[in-house]
Image (cartoon, grey):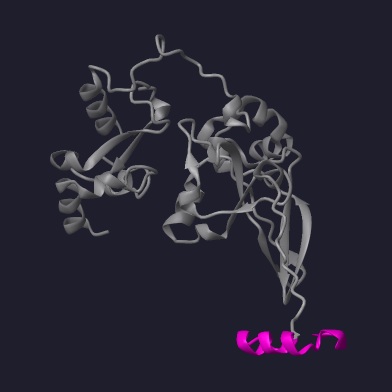
C-alpha cells in the first residue's frame, strides 16, 4: 500500500525543500497489527485450565501439602497417552508424596500442571497422533492421602477399603480443612503463643531410639547400616516442626535421602554426606 502526495503539493519551493531534506515524494508503508494475548489472573487459571510448572515453582508446606504463588494447589499430569483406545488416566496429588518424590528423582517433574478447582474435574490432553483437549474426572493419589493421614487413610488398609475411600473423597472437604488461599489462613498461634521450632531437650535420646527400633534402615531407599555407622542415619521431621516428635512425624533417612528432601540441599555440603557418597554411591 502506498500514499502519493496530491498534485497541488508539487510546488517548486516544496520540492526544493524536499530534495534538501532527502525526503521521497512517495512513502510506502504496511499496516501492522500488534497481538498481545490476554492472560487471566492466576486464581482463575488455577480454577480452570491449570498452570504448567517446574519443580522449583512448587513450595512444600509444613503440613506436606503443595503451594504455588500463595495458593494451595493440586498437581497432575495433563498429557495422557491413548494406547489402542485405552486412556491411562493419571491421579492428582495434593501432597508431596513418595510418588512425586520418585518422579522428581527421575527428572519427570516438568510434565506436571497445578490447579485447585474443587469439583474433581481437570483439563487434560489426549495424545494420539493429534492432541485432543478434554475435561475429565480424576482420582486422588492414595499415597497422598496416606502421607497426610486423611480421615485415617493408610496404605495398610485393604484394596477394597482404599478404593471406597478414594471414591468418596471430596476436594471441597479437603479445601475446607486446607484452604486454597494461603493469605486467608488464620495463624494457629500468635507471636506470644507460637512454639519454638527447635529440637526438644530429649531429642538425642528420641532419635537414637528411633534408629534402634527401625534397625538403622532408611525408610526411602531401604539401605541398612550398622550401629557404628548411625551418623549416616538421620531422623527427619516430616512436617518440618522440630518440636513435633510424634512417631508418625518421624522418618528415618540415610543422609543421601535426607539431602533430597525439599529445602535440604544444603546437607550435600556436609563432610558426612561426602563420606557417605564415597562409600555407598550417589
Q: Is residue 116 left or right of residue 243?
A: right
In the depicted structure, whether residue 166 falls above or below residue 20: above
Q: Which image quadrant is residue 225 in?
A: top left
Residue 115 position within the rendered picture, expressed as x and y whole percent measured from the top left: 65, 46
| Number of numbered discs on residues | 0
In the depicted structure, whether residue 257 falls above or below residue 186: below
* Furthest residue in direction front, as rendered: 13
- Return the residue nearer the eye: 23 or 256: 23
- Return the residue nearer the eye: 109 or 216: 109
Residue 278 position within the rendered picture, expressed as x and y whole percent measured from the top left: 17, 58
Residue 138 position within the rendered picture, expressed as x and y whole percent measured from the top left: 71, 48
Residue 224 position within the rendered picture, expressed as x and y whole percent measured from the top left: 26, 46
Q: Is residue 20 magenta?
A: yes
Q: Is residue 54 magenta?
A: no
Q: Which residues are magenta?
A: 1-26
Q: Which image quadrant is residue 133 in?
A: bottom right
Which part of the image, by quadrant, shows the N terminus? Answer: bottom right
Q: Which image quadrant is residue 119 in?
A: top right
In the depicted structure, whether residue 119 falls above or below residue 248: below
User: Residue at horizontal 72%, vertical 31%?
Assistant: 172
User: Residue at horizontal 29%, vertical 22%?
Assistant: 198
User: Residue at horizontal 45%, vertical 61%?
Assistant: 107
Does the rendering let one see residue 215? no
Which part of the image, by quadrant, shows the C terminus? Answer: bottom left
Does the rendering let one see residue 74? yes
Q: Is residue 188 left or right of residue 86?
A: left
Amino acid at each position: 500500500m502506498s500514499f502519493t502526495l496530491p498534485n497541488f503539493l508539487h510546488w517548486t519551493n516544496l520540492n526544493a525543500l524536499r530534495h534538501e531534506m532527502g525526503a521521497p515524494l512517495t512513502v510506502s508503508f504496511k499496516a501492522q497489527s500488534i497481538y498481545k494475548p490476554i492472560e487471566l489472573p492466576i486464581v482463575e487459571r488455577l480454577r480452570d485450565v491449570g498452570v504448567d510448572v517446574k519443580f522449583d515453582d512448587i513450595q512444600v508446606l509444613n503440613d506436606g501439602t503443595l503451594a504455588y504463588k500463595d495458593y494451595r494447589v493440586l498437581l497432575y499430569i495433563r498429557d495422557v497417552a491413548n494406547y489402542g483406545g485405552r486412556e491411562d488416566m493419571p491421579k492428582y496429588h495434593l501432597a508431596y508424596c513418595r510418588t512425586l518424590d520418585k518422579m522428581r528423582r527421575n527428572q519427570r517433574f516438568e510434565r506436571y500442571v497445578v490447579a485447585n478447582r474443587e469439583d474433581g474435574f481437570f483439563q487434560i490432553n489426549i495424545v494420539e497422533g493429534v492432541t485432543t483437549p478434554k475435561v475429565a474426572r480424576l482420582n486422588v493419589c492414595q499415597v497422598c492421602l496416606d502421607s497426610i493421614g486423611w480421615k485415617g487413610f493408610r496404605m495398610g488398609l485393604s484394596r477394597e477399603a482404599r478404593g471406597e475411600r478414594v471414591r468418596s473423597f471430596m476436594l471441597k472437604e479437603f479445601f475446607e480443612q486446607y484452604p486454597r488461599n494461603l493469605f486467608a489462613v488464620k495463624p494457629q498461634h500468635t507471636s506470644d503463643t507460637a512454639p519454638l521450632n527447635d529440637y526438644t531437650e530429649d531429642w538425642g535420646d528420641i532419635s537414637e531410639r528411633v534408629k534402634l527400633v527401625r534397625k538403622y534402615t532408611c525408610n526411602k531407599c531401604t539401605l541398612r547400616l550398622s550401629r557404628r555407622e548411625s551418623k549416616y542415619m538421620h531422623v527427619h521431621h516430616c512436617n518440618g516442626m522440630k518440636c513435633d516428635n510424634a512417631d508418625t512425624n518421624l522418618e528415618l533417612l540415610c543422609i543421601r535421602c535426607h539431602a533430597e528432601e525439599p529445602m535440604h540441599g544444603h546437607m550435600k555440603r556436609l563432610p558426612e554426606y561426602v563420606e557417605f557418597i564415597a562409600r555407598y554411591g550417589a
